[in-house]
Image (cartoon, rainbow, N blue to C red):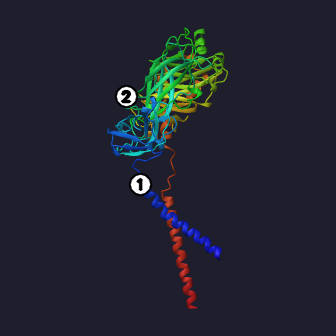
Amino acid sequence: MFEKWSKISIIFFLIIGFSLGGPISKSFAEEGENESKSVEDIQVSLSKTNLKPGDVVTVVMSGENLKSTGLYDQKINITFISKLWDEFSLEYTGNPFNAYIEGTLIFDEKENVYKGEIIVPEKAIDGEWYLSRAAYGYGGDVLTVSHTFEVESGYTDVIAPTVKDISFYAGTYTNQPYQDSPITVHPGDQLTVVIDAFDNDGGVGIGDERPFVSLNNLKDSDGRFEMIIESIDLEQIPGTTKYAATLTIPEETQDGIIGLRLWQVQDSAGNFIYTGPEIGEHKKVFVKEKENIKEPILNVSGSVGTVDTNNEEFNKYLQNSDTIDLQFGGNKDLNKLVLPLTKEQIEILKEKQEDVSITFGNEEVSLKLPVSNLSLKDTVIQIEKEDKLNNSLTNIFDFHILQDGEEVHQFAETMTLKFQLSQDASNPVVYYIADDMNSLEELESNYENNVVFGYTNHFSRYTVMEKESSDIVPDVPVAEEAQTEEQNSGEPEQNVTNASKETKQSQVITKEEKDSVQSGPKLPDTAGTDGNLLLIGVVLLLIGFGLYTIKKREHRFKK
């Protein structure tokens, strides 16, 4: 019993002790919060306590333990840091302008103290600041001393911008997706760097502090390098969170890899993120000695454009290019684009060390096809342009791949379809059009600067529509119009395989079939006279049964 009461007494006194001790210790802490603190008999005092941006403050450091005899003891370098920024800062981030205050104290022989001035930054972070370092001269002894003060500014942004992506592009940037494979450039070529970054608390790259990069050329495994460009500022692409800069690879650049030596993105509050970890093998830029390679040619016959691939110059292009970019401008009037490739040419692409993609199309539509989707067979890639649907933003485009004459619809790797819009749109989406031409299926899509990207692993018909209007029944061209267009197109008959002809014919719907599909099947008419008579009969039968039951009960009662 005594032992039990002893335990209770101990717990009781512990509770009382914590209850009394907390407020007492807190009062001592608050009493000395903004006063000079002494460690090893060193005192620090400021001419002001509650500081504001732009204030010039005198700092005095005194104490018997301070030295003043040596050559390097005549100065003490001090650094104050914002406590709020220090708590929230992450690796590879900084804010030297608004989160740090540095100063130098000079020994005053008359007063036997160290004295100097500090200036509070115009955008100094609000809240408590603390003395993080005090040391004699440069590289001298570090002093064990502490001090805090308060800044009243209203600035509380201490989070650095978020960098979503850093990509390289051969030539200029034209709204391509993020870089997903290494690229190759040659001395004299243009290279574009794009950083996609945003800041929730303010703008990125405001004023003179724009995002910048520094590039070098890694020459060998020993790590030796040559500078490509010391520093280049990136300009914001209007209407986006992306920043871009285009530079020219110097002619003297040797074979190797171009690497990011430095990069930095800063927000309007002075918080920045820099360099950081490696950005990935798929972001590499290879430099190769320039060869005299002719660009591929598009031969046009009527409304059909066919890439000239049956020559040695095209094979050389495939061998020396890591990015196969076959986009031909100024050909919007064509109704069909054709890219024939032999199995030997497919093999050339597959033998490359990097994952290679083929980009094929014109300024109106194009596709990006991973070569891994192709077998070692003679291949024909086709894009056919058809009439628009009701309320669609682009024409219908039918994508085909034939290997050894057989059409392939399904692929292992995702392909990117790119559509250029001729008008502004609010929420455009790429839609797959079913074979019956009367149902649509939404694709994963992305929209930037009048360009819509769709992602699929299936080839068929596709178009772009506003998402809210996609439930409207397609206005499918009637068979007579489709036949007239085919006659006027002037397409060479030999460029269309029998398989593609049959597919096209099976997808044309006559006007009568369209009206039948849109009107839908009719339900049977159940509101005729036969139905009414049946209902009356049932009602009379129920009334008769009720009267019979009543009479039977009355008869029993009389008995």
Marks 1 and 2 sit apart, C-alpha to C-alpha, by 41 Å
Label 2 neighbour load within 10 Å: few <14, some 14-19, many 20+ = few
Name the spot of residue 35 as percent of width and height, x first.
Answer: 39, 49
Classify the position of the N terminus by image quarter: bottom right
Which dot marks residue 232?
A: none
Name the spot of residue 386 as percent of width and height, x first.
Answer: 48, 27
Identify the residue position indicated by label 1 in the image. Answer: 30
Identify the residue position indicated by label 2 in the image. Answer: 208
Q: Is mark 2 on a helix, strand or loop?
A: loop
Name the N-terminal-most of marks 1 and 2: 1
Residue drawn at x 56%, y 9% is: 291
Q: What element carries label 1?
A: helix
Name the spot of residue 351 as percent of width and height, x first.
Answer: 66, 19
Classify the position of the C terminus by image quarter: bottom right
User: Left or right: 349 with respect to 226?
Assistant: right
Is residue 242 at least partly visible in the picture? yes
Amino acid type, label 2: Asp
Is residue 407 at least partly visible in the picture? no
